[in-house]
Amino acid sequence: LAYCGGGFCVDFEVGGRRFRGVADTGSPFILVSTCAEGAQASGLEDTDEMFAAGSARVVWRRAGLGLGGVGLGNVTYGTMLEVESYGGNGGGAFLGLIRERASRIRPTLLGQTGHRTIAVDLRTPGQESLRLSSKSLSSADGGAAVVSPLIKLLDLRSAGAPVRYYAAEVSSLSFGGEPLSWPGRIVAVLDTGTTGLGLPPVLFERYDELRRARAGEVGLRAASAVELRLASATGGDGGSGG
């Protein structure tokens, strides 16, 4: 992985043409900005696709995919036309890493390649990496024990989501050191295609209210701090971020 434009990118080839795209756990598709030479018609109708940084008219094609020096065969991918970008990486290439989808959604990358697990390692600056494997998590690590707590992932398709996002239940959320009391369930989507923490409007309003109330007491920096913990597979806290 290489840091680029506020995200992490990976080099790949489609139809023999090289691209650098965002490694995106919030997206299911390969999307590029130009057609690869020798691309074949996919037989699928064009679609309008929406994403966090914009929207685009997408033409679906088929061509050979190369990733990490390995050929992965012919895959269906999208070429973006008439892009409306809201900033960030909108309009650039994307390597989508969501596997499972609703039947009405175009074929996902991982659904075509047969990969079973992904590992995005951002622990060491300058040595960030992406690894795809057809094996289970422990097998992909050569049998090494998983040292991080396992997070139970939720399938939001039952709530109308078009794909199976990497989503987890939030076990606790604090704004400015104050635990948030919330009547409903809060779910977080783990998305490497974005930076920082995004809050829906109703939660952001609560965050802004608490931040303003706490700023005079602890200072603006401390009042603006956010701590989020995800529920682990065993029912405890699986991890946090601030």
Image (cartoon, rainbow, N blue to C red):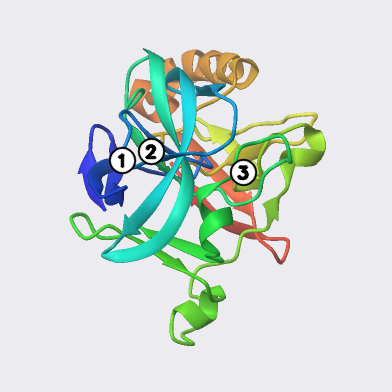
Tell me where residue 104 sits by quadrant. top right
Q: Secondary structure at mark 1?
A: strand
Q: Residues within 10 Å of mark 3 (few under 14, many from 20)?
A: many
Upstream in sequence: badge 1 or badge 2: 1
Mark 1 to mark 3: distance in Å? Answer: 19 Å
Residue at the limit of the structure toward the left, as seen here? 126
Asked if the residue under mark 2 is in contact with the one under mark 3, i.e. CB atoms within 8 Å, the reply is no
Q: Please identify, in this view, whether the residue under mark 1 or under mark 3 is nearer the observer.
A: 1
Question: Residue 186, position in %: x, y?
Answer: 70, 36
Residue nearest the viewer, comparing 91 with 148: 91
Asked if the residue under mark 2 is in contact with the one under mark 1, i.e. CB atoms within 8 Å, the reply is yes
Side (left or right) of 174 relative to 219: right
In the picture of the structure, the residue carrying the numbered disc 2 is 94
| Tag shown at residue 165 | 3
Q: Please identify, in this view, whether the residue under mark 3 or under mark 2 is nearer the observer.
A: 2
Question: Residue 31, position in %: x, y?
Answer: 41, 35
In the picture of the structure, the residue carrying the numbered disc 1 is 21
Q: Residues within 10 Å of mark 2 (few under 14, many from 20)?
A: many
Q: Secondary structure at mark 2?
A: strand
Question: Residue 223, position in %: x, y?
Answer: 43, 25
Query: Which amino acid, mark 2?
Result: Phe
Side (left or right) of 184 relative to 92: right
Query: Which amino acid, mark 3?
Result: Tyr
Upstream in sequence: badge 3 or badge 2: 2
Query: Which amino acid, mark 1?
Result: Gly
Upstream in sequence: badge 1 or badge 3: 1
Q: Secondary structure at mark 3?
A: loop
